[in-house]
Image (cartoon, coloured by chain):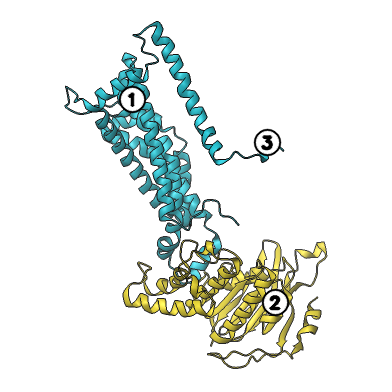
Chain colours: A cyan, B yellow
């Protein structure tokens, strides 16, 4: 039998999925054990115990200077920035994406500009933002919004254009005005795709968040990673990276669940 | 009473003449089937009736008034595909026409107005045999059921004329016969005026009161561009079908009746 026609059983699939993770963990443990047995003060590949010690300090011990539990305050401020940036981005992409996808005049006005704008590497705007809006929250949130909004706007506009023309004609023959079509036909069909676009946009959003925090911030997950880097504190960096990964994964899962729950009629790849 | 008049319709795309000199008067309550080989412009003609396309010259009058140059409620439509809204339930799909009509800003009805609309929608759903499926989404319906839903949805808005664009073309033969029977029933009971585009001659004769065949008279390659399709046959279907309601009068047509069997021979 050809290999493309052989499918692993369910149990085997789970095992296969776990294998690369286990392999990575085992490889790391071996490397860490070897380095530490030669030099117990080695900082490059800390053991799990060392990481847990470092993390419990950040999680459960108040910071002497600020009185905060650093791990949690870092997480909160980073998530806040991410939420604000994505919120702005979603609002912009919905309003202008739907308008540009549905109304020819607005499409002619908005689309070329957005396409040109989306070619700017957002990170190069960061200095401009620092100069113009300062080093505080606004610049980081703006960077996330600028980095993701064009992407999402184009996804929304495309989703609107993908609505079969017949459906729009049908709505008109039922007497719908442009506004009624936007609220009752276009928006409901675009929202599930907006969630898909949000899931994709979260990837660059995290990149811009961590970059902005690394360059100029006094708090946040990215700030912490780049701060402790100076002391080669891999025992903090590695758990932080894992934590960011976990957060990103949880967000993705929540959005996927939200999409299934809110839009039971929506199947990404329709069968016909 | 609805009369649809097409006066000397020409349609050209650049140098290509698609339709020439189409003159049709469609009386209230008739069921006109437009047939013809593919590419003869029958769908273009339907699009002009819908208001999606405009004739290069000539006029289309609905009850003596020129058609609005965009689709509107006075002309209902059922396409072969994508006729219903996937994000609305069966009941929602039928209701939406009434909601567009009665709630200009929200596009939604509440309270007693909604109840009245729901009652009308249920009556229609019953007449298309979908009474037991009102809470399903279209994706859960078969192709035949989706087309029946599309019919109910279009009828809910009470259009002056119903346009059908190969509505049953994608259905299995058995299902198609069922939907034909239903279509005929709806036409008889609701007293509607229908224009249907189809490439299926037997369908045209089974459902239509009048079959209009479009054809290119000149088909040599060097002539093709400069001569469009026009009306080749205009046949009143025998025996005449009668509606029971509203436009109840029997169909009166100027052309002498021809037997259905002869007529299909005449077209091809």
- Residue bearing mark 1: A214
- Nearer the observer: mark 1 or 3; the answer is 3
How dense is the environment of label 3, judged by Cα within 10 Å: few (below 14), some, or many (20 and up)?
Answer: few
> Residue A96's x, y, as percent?
40, 50
For the residue labelled by badge 3, is the local secondary structure a helix, a strand or a loop?
helix
A138 on left or right of A44: left
Question: Relative to B70, is A228 on the left or the right?
Answer: left
Percent x, y for residue A8? Answer: 60, 38
Figure check: A14 above or below A227: below
Q: Residue furthest bottom?
A: B249
- Residue contact at pointers 3 and 2, CB within 8 angstroms: no
Residue B220 visible, this orientation: yes
Q: In which quadrant of the rendered image does the C terminus of chain B lie?
A: bottom right
Pointer 1 or 3: first along the chain:
3
Tag 1's secondary structure?
A: helix
The residue lying at 67 percent from left, 66 percent from top is B12
User: In 3D space, how far apart are the residues under numbered discs 2 and 1 (Cα atoms)?
Assistant: 71 Å
In the rendered image, which residue does mark 2 sit on?
A: B203
Residue highlighted by disc 3:
A3
Circles 3 and 2 on the same subunit: no
* Residue B174 quadrant: bottom right
What element does badge 2 sit on?
Answer: helix
Q: Which residue reaches farthest right?
A: B220
Across and down, in percent, residue B224 comes to 78, 64
Gap in Å between the C-alphas at discs 1 and 3? 46 Å
């Amino acid at each position: 039998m050809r290999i493309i026609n052989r499918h692993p059983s369910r149990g085997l699939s789970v095992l296969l999925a776990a294998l690369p993770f286990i392999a990575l963990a085992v490889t790391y443990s071996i490397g860490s054990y070897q380095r530490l047995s030669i030099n117990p003060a080695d900082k490059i590949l800390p053991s799990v115990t060392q990481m847990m010690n470092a993390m419990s300090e950040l999680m459960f011990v108040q910071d002497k200077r600020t009185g905060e539990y650093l791990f949690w305050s870092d997480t909160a401020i980073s998530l806040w920035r991410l939420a604000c940036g994505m919120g702005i981005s979603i609002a912009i992409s919905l309003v202008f994406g739907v308008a540009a996808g549905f109304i020819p005049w607005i499409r002619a006005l908005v689309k070329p500009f957005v396409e040109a704008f989306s070619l700017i590497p957002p990170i190069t705007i960061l200095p401009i933002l620092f100069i113009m809006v300062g080093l505080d929250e606004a610049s980081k949130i703006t960077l996330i919004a600028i980095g993701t909004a064009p992407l999402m706007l184009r996804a929304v506009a495309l989703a609107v254009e993908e609505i079969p023309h017949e459906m729009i004609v049908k709505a008109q023959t039922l007497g719908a005005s442009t506004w009624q079509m936007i609220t009752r036909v276009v928006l409901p069909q675009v929202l599930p795709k907006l969630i898909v676009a949000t899931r994709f946009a979260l990837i660059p959003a995290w990149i811009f968040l961590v970059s902005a925090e690394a360059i100029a911030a006094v708090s946040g997950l990215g700030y912490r990673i780049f701060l402790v880097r100076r002391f080669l504190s891999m025992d903090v960096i590695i758990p932080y990276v894992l934590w960011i990964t976990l957060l990103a994964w949880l967000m993705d899962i929540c959005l996927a669940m939200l999409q299934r729950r809110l839009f039971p009629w929506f199947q990404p790849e329709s069968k016909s | 009473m609805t009369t649809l008049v097409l006066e000397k319709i020409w349609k050209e795309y650049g140098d290509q003449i698609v339709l020439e000199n189409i003159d049709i008067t469609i009386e209230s309550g008739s069921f006109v089937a437009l047939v013809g080989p593919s590419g003869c412009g029958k769908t273009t003609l339907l699009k002009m009736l819908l208001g999606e396309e405009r004739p290069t010259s000539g006029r289309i009058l609905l009850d003596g008034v020129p058609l609005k140059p965009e689709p509107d409620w006075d002309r209902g439509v059922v396409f072969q595909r994508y006729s219903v809204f996937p994000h609305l339930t069966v009941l929602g799909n039928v209701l939406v026409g009434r909601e567009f009509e009665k709630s200009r800003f929200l596009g939604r009805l509440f309270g007693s107005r909604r109840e009245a609309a729901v009652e009308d929608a249920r009556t229609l759903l019953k007449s298309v045999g979908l009474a037991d499926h009102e809470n399903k989404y279209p994706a859960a319906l078969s192709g035949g059921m989706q087309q029946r839903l599309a019919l109910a949805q279009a009828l809910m808005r009470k259009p002056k004329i119903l346009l059908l664009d190969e509505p049953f073309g994608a259905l299995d033969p058995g299902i198609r016969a069922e939907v034909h029977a239903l279509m005929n029933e709806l036409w008889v009971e609701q007293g509607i005026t229908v224009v249907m585009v189809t490439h299926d001659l037997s369908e045209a004769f089974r459902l239509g009161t009048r079959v209009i065949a479009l054809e290119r008279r000149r088909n040599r390659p060097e002539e093709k561009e400069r001569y469009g399709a026009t009306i080749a046959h205009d046949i009143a279907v025998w025996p005449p079908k009668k509606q029971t309601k509203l436009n109840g009068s029997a169909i009166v047509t100027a052309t002498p009746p021809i037997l259905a069997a002869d007529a299909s021979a005449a077209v091809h």
